[in-house]
Amino acid sequence: QVQLVESGGGSVQTGGSLRLSCAVSGISSRYTMGWFRQTPEKEREGVATINSGGGIRYADSVKGRFTISHDNAKNTLYLQMNSLKPDDTAMYYCAASSRYSIVTMWKGAFEYWGQGTQVTVSS
């Protein structure tokens, strides 16, 4: 059974930092993994993705501020978020794809999803 469980969300002020974690079970470390976010006003969008070869892709809006990483030993995906802005406020979701080995930001490529963790950035 595949499980993706996010943690680490919370409320911070502008300029603050958070680290999201996604504990993964039931799937291979060869999967492509990613972080997505969604607000009531916007569709779910890709934030950062990483594949088993270490390829990484970021959304332009988070480049230089967010870092995605994967600990193979713990089978845990991370998203380090620095210099947070109010526009980063969203529900953040961890996702996994068994079908795509490329670092795609297309949400349709991912068949497994976590329940989400809320990030709120106040000005």
Image (cartoon, rainbow, N blue to C red):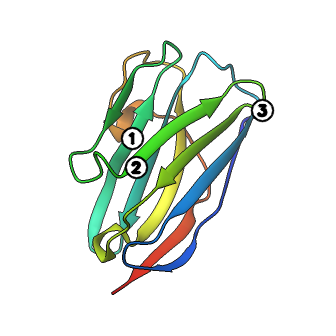
Q: Are marks 3 and 2 in contact (CB under 8 Å)?
A: no
Residue drawn at 72 percent across, 31 percent down: 75
Could you say whether the residue bearing mark 1 is in a helix, strand or loop? strand
Residue 97, image x, y percentages? 51, 27
State how many labels appear: 3
Q: First in sequence: mark 3 or mark 2?
A: 2
Q: Amino acid at mark 1?
A: Ala
Q: First in sequence: mark 1 or mark 3?
A: 1
The disc at residue 48 is 1
Q: First in sequence: mark 2 or mark 1?
A: 1
In this picture, residue 100 sits left or right of residue 62: right
Q: Quadrant of residue 88?
A: bottom left
Q: Are marks 2 and 1 in contact (CB under 8 Å)?
A: yes
**Label 2 packing within 10 angstroms: few (<14), some (14-19), many (20+):** many
104 to 10, vertically: above or below = above
How far is disc 3 from disc 2 in space, using C-alphas?
21 Å
35 to 39, vertically: above or below = above
Q: Which residue is mark 3?
A: 74
The disc at residue 66 is 2
Mark 3 vs mark 2: give the one in front: 2
Q: Are marks 1 and 3 in contact (CB under 8 Å)?
A: no
Residue drawn at 42 percent across, 34 percent down: 49
Residue 41, image x, y percentages? 27, 74
Q: Amino acid at mark 3?
A: Lys
Residue drawn at 32 percent across, 71 percent down: 85
Q: Amino acid at mark 2?
A: Phe
